[in-house]
Image (tube, rainbow, N blue to C red):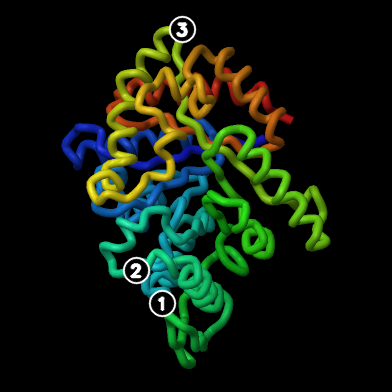
Amino acid sequence: MRFGIFDHLDDSGKPLARHFEDRLRLIEAYDRLGYHAYHLAEHHNTPLGYAPSPSVFLAAVAQRTRKIKFGPMVYLLPLYHPLRLIDEVCMLDQMSNGRFLYGVGRGISPVEVGFYGVNFDTGAEQFREAFEVTRLGFTEDRVTLHGKFYDFDNVPVPMKPLQKPYPELWYGIGRPESLPWVAQHGANIVARRPIPAVKAVVDAYRTEWQRLGRAEPDLPLIGVNRHIVVAETDAAAREIGRRAYPAWRRHMGLLWHEYGVPFPLEAALPPEFETILECGDAVAGTPETVRKFIEHEIAETGINYYVCDFAFGTIDQADALRSAELFAREVIPAFAA
């Protein structure tokens, strides 16, 4: 069982320069504490995500850490020129001595991709074509692809990533329909859904993996992402979450509501922290409370990766750091093989 970090880098209410520096210091702590990976969201024109150019922030992460893996969760491929993205990924992988994780996706928000002139209805098709361009760029010296969205003929690509054939592939899973593509490419996945939906994804991935004739021990990481607050008492942890969560939840739905687009997570993400605890999409409590919650979720879903969101909304830096430290010291060892 491995444990990682997910981060929206959403508006904390602090001056932006301080917000960035505080988060980098927190990531340095994740590195020291032994977390497996740091996953950074990409969002645009919204306080939900203050890393709309993940590569820029992750370049700083590469230089401020030594062991932790890191990457976007996910690059919204239809928003990138694939030749430029090839170069950025190769640079980040080389600069970090092969710690970069190549997270890819199409984007969940039609509003955000629409700002860039991308047709959400054809986003999945464009995503797959863009991914193929990057795959060719990572593995071949020249790229030739004549597609619906991109047209390249014998374009030289001299730079290559350190990891071969290319950096570890990650995908933020929302719907089981994506699993054939995910399994074909051996991608690691992270989901944020209720326990029954996560179990359905895990079971479907295992079935698809077996259908391809691949062995169970080779199964990629299949993870779930939850908000987590750890403190000395359950009451203290719940109070921290109660104060911090509403800003994050407001940021989540902001663009959808402003532009009159139905928010698909409206029911799944209630506005009150106490309600989200009851729904099982977050946990707040002592290390023992959190450990029991995670044990139950692992048993119910069969996941092999747990992704913690410690820093969200207006949570205080010290509270996020305490959660990460208590979790690393008193929760993770219980899951050591």
Q: Kindly state the secondary structure of the residue where label 3 is placed.
A: loop
The quadrant of the rendering that contains the C terminus is: top right
Q: Nearer the viewer, residue 58 or 14?
A: 14
Counting residues from the start of the chain, the first of labels 2 and 3 encountered is 2
Q: Which mark is residue 233?
A: 3
Query: Are the residues at dot 2 and dot 1 in contact (C-beta closer than 8 Å)?
Result: no
Q: Residues within 10 Å of mark 3 (few under 14, many from 20)?
A: some
Counting residues from the start of the chain, the first of labels 3 and 1 encountered is 1
Q: Quadrant location of residue 15?
A: top left
Q: Is residue 131 above or below residue 295?
A: below
Q: Residue at x 25, y 47 (%)?
A: 46
Q: Is residue 57 above or below residue 274?
A: below
Please state which of the two labelled residues, at mark 2 or mark 3, is closer to the viewer: 2
Counting residues from the start of the chain, the first of labels 2 and 1 encountered is 1
Q: Nearer the viewer, residue 29 or 143?
A: 143
Query: Are the residues at dot 3 and dot 1 in contact (C-beta closer than 8 Å)?
Result: no
Q: Residue at x 68, y 44 (%)?
A: 202
Q: Kindly state the secondary structure of the residue where label 1 is placed.
A: helix
Q: Nearer the viewer, residue 216 or 271?
A: 271
Q: Residue 217's spot in the image, x, y percent? A: 79, 48
Q: Residue 119's spot in the image, x, y percent? A: 36, 69
Q: Residue at x 28, y 27 (%)?
A: 314
Question: What residue would you read off at disc 1?
Answer: 83
Give the Cα separation between the discs numbered 3 and 1.
51 Å
Q: Residue 103's spot in the image, x, y percent? A: 50, 56
- Give the left or right position of residue 89, taking residue 18 as reference: right
For badge 3, the amino acid type reads Thr
Q: Which mark is residue 118?
A: 2
Q: Quadrant location of residue 21?
A: top left
Q: Residue at x 55, y 78 (%)?
A: 136
Query: Are the residues at dot 2 and dot 3 in contact (C-beta closer than 8 Å)?
Result: no
